[in-house]
Image: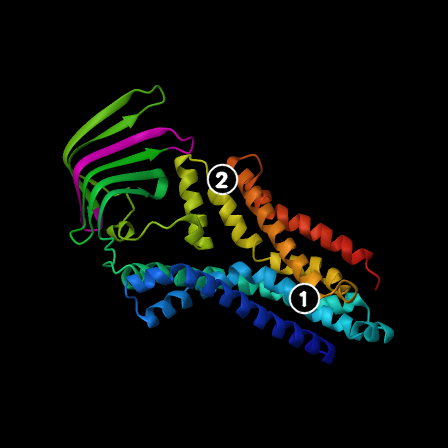
Amino acid sequence: MKILDKYLLVEFLKALFFILIAFIFIFVIVDLFDDLSKFIEKKVAIFDIFLFYLYQVPSIAILVFPVAVLLSLFFSLGMMAKHFEILALKANGISLYRIFLTYLLAGFAMSFIVILVNEIGVPYANEKVRDHKRTKINKLPPIDYRLQNNLKYLGENGYIYSIKTYDGRKKEIRRVSVLKFSEGNRLVRRIDAKIGIWKDDVWEFQDGYVRVFTDTLNQRVIRFKNREFPELKEKPADFSRRVKSLDEMKYSEVKGYVKKLRKTGKDPSKALVELYTKISFPFVTFIIIILGAPLSADTRRSGLAFGFALSLLISFIYWGGLQVSKAYGIKGNVPPALAAWVPNIIFLVIGLFLIIRIKK
């Protein structure tokens, strides 16, 4: 790494660190003042309040990271332009493209870091926030997912479970219905039973019946007193987990959920949009640098205040565009992959256009 690259990266990363800390601090302070009366009323310990916000740091950091990167770029390149450092570099035969290359490589690397944090750090931290809020803030007992009522579960191979009562300690399910769908979203089989018991790694249902549906909508009913169903692959431990929302799932979990939806013939558009967004959103860090670099290099004329305002405007436009694009993808008006990547593509095209037009 050359001395120039080190200098550019150090100045950029220093600005990024302080701006990111500032954003997190502002978010916490605003939220704290909003909930302070609730904390006092419930007599929450100061240390528990501290942990509550500490667990939220990864998700806050990921949320504000793109705008922090853009602001850091405006600040570091803007200060260089203001102090005529960019002019000096150009006078020594170093083009703006060479300067931008350092930031682009840094942005590309940071995109993978964001993916890693989003996959490992954020889900773990969000789970800690949820549990901490329930037990330490709201003073409620932990939820025991081994005892549940009215449980709905999307299983493997197109099976959907509807369970009135689930007891994970006894490994029993009561008043259970299991529906089997084909990939064409057609009901092909239904199992109903008063009780299901997990014995020898197999579900044994008691006092129920099996309905098999044909293409002509006729059905064949088979009653049983005791019957094993080895085709049901779900174990009691699967029902003992909290059902996560799409934004709480990791990439692999969303991918598995999409596969399950397709097995039942249900529309996976919403899950697919979320799946592709988990990749597209981290790369906005790289794309925002492509867009911001040529704008930042001319900050000497417009001023740092203008750069700050422009950074916020660009960020709001991106967020708004992403939400609109995702909505169209969920409704099926736009392919899910395109819906997740459209804002990135638009910003990339604009950024490349600005880079081409800038004077080297």
Residue type highlighted by circle 1? Leu
Q: Name the residue at 28% across, 66% down.
A: 43
What residue do we see at 25% from left, 61% from top? 139
Between 181 and 77, the one nearer to me in the picture: 77
- Report the disc number at residue 225: none
Q: CA distance from mark 1 to mark 2?
A: 36 Å
Q: Indicate yes or no whether the magenta region holds residue 238.
A: no
Q: Is residue 312 above or below residue 15?
A: above
Counting from the top left corner in percent of width and height, residue 136 is at 29, 64
Q: How many marks?
A: 2
Q: Which SS type dominates the magenta stretch?
A: strand
Secondary structure under tag 1 reads helix
Residue on which the image places disc 1: 73
Give the amino acid at mark 2. Answer: Ser
Q: Earlier in the sequence, mark 1 or mark 2?
A: 1
Q: What residue does disc 2 label? A: 269
The spot of residue 294 in percent (x, y) is 75, 61
Answer above or below: position of 237 versus 71.
above
Q: In the picture, which quadrant includes the N terminus?
A: bottom right
x, y percent for residue 228:
20, 41
Residue beneath the point at 30% across and 31% down: 189
The residue segment tinted magenta is 182-202
Local packing at callout 1 (Cα closer than 10 Å; few below 14, some 14-19, many 20+) is many
Q: Are marks 1 and 2 in contact (CB under 8 Å)?
A: no
Q: Is residue 135 left or right of residue 50?
A: left
Q: Position of residue 267 (x, y in %)?
A: 45, 36
Instruction: Find residue 298 and report its image quarter.
Output: bottom right
Query: In the rendered view of the protein, which quadrant contains the C terminus?
Result: bottom right
